[in-house]
Image (cartoon, rainbow, N blue to C red):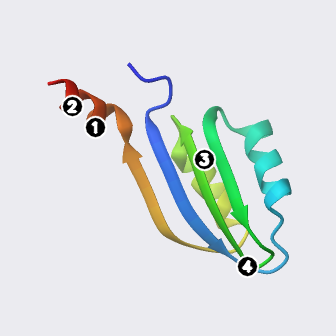
């Protein structure tokens, strides 16, 4: 059983985006690992492993236009490989 079930990725397009501030918010408010926030003031890519991707998605939607959203169930992938 994986500690974090979902692989969460998306892009955020906006104005004045701050990758350090977004990363700090994730670290403080969401339980997960493998956090990666990269980009510039107009475009960020976020990658995160969590059990509650909908919370992270809701937060990201407050920052700008979100797109290229991918939420993969890694537990199902692992189970398929083991089965």
- Front of the two marks 1 and 4: 1
Label 3 secondary element: helix
Q: Is residue 12 above or below residue 26?
A: below
Given contact means CB atoms under 8 Å apart, are the residues at marks 1 and 2 in contact?
yes
User: How many numbered circles does the render carry?
Assistant: 4
* Neighbourhood count class around disc 1 (C-alpha, 10 Å): few under 14, some 14–19, many 20 upward: few
Alpha-carbon span between mark 3 and mark 2: 28 Å
* Neighbourhood count class around disc 3 (C-alpha, 10 Å): few under 14, some 14–19, many 20 upward: few
Label ID, residue 55? 3
Q: Nearer the viewer, residue 59 or 71?
A: 71
Which residue does the image show at 54% across and 63% down from the upper left? Answer: 10
Q: Nearer the viewer, residue 15 or 44?
A: 44
- Front of the two marks 4 and 3: 4
Q: Is residue 83 above or below residue 7?
A: above
Of mark 3 and mark 2, the one earlier in the sequence is 3
Of mark 1 and mark 4, the one earlier in the sequence is 4
Which residue does the image show at 84% across and 65% down from the upper left? Answer: 18
Of mark 2 and mark 4, the one earlier in the sequence is 4
What residue did someone put label 2 on? 81
Q: On the image, which quarter does residue 37 sit in?
A: bottom right
What residue did someone put label 4 on? 14
Q: Is residue 6 above or below residue 81?
A: below
Of mark 1 and mark 3, the one earlier in the sequence is 3
Q: On the image, which quarter does residue 46 sit in?
A: bottom right
What residue did someone put label 1 on? 77
């Amino acid at each position: 059983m994986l500690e974090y079930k979902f692989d969460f990725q998306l892009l955020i397009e906006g104005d004045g985006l701050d990758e350090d501030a977004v990363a700090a918010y994730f670290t403080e408010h969401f339980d997960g690992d493998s956090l990666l926030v990269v980009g510039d003031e107009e475009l960020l890519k976020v990658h995160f492993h969590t059990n509650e991707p909908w919370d992270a998605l809701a937060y990201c939607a407050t920052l700008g236009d979100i797109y290229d959203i991918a939420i993969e169930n890694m537990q199902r992938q692992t189970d398929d490989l083991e089965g």
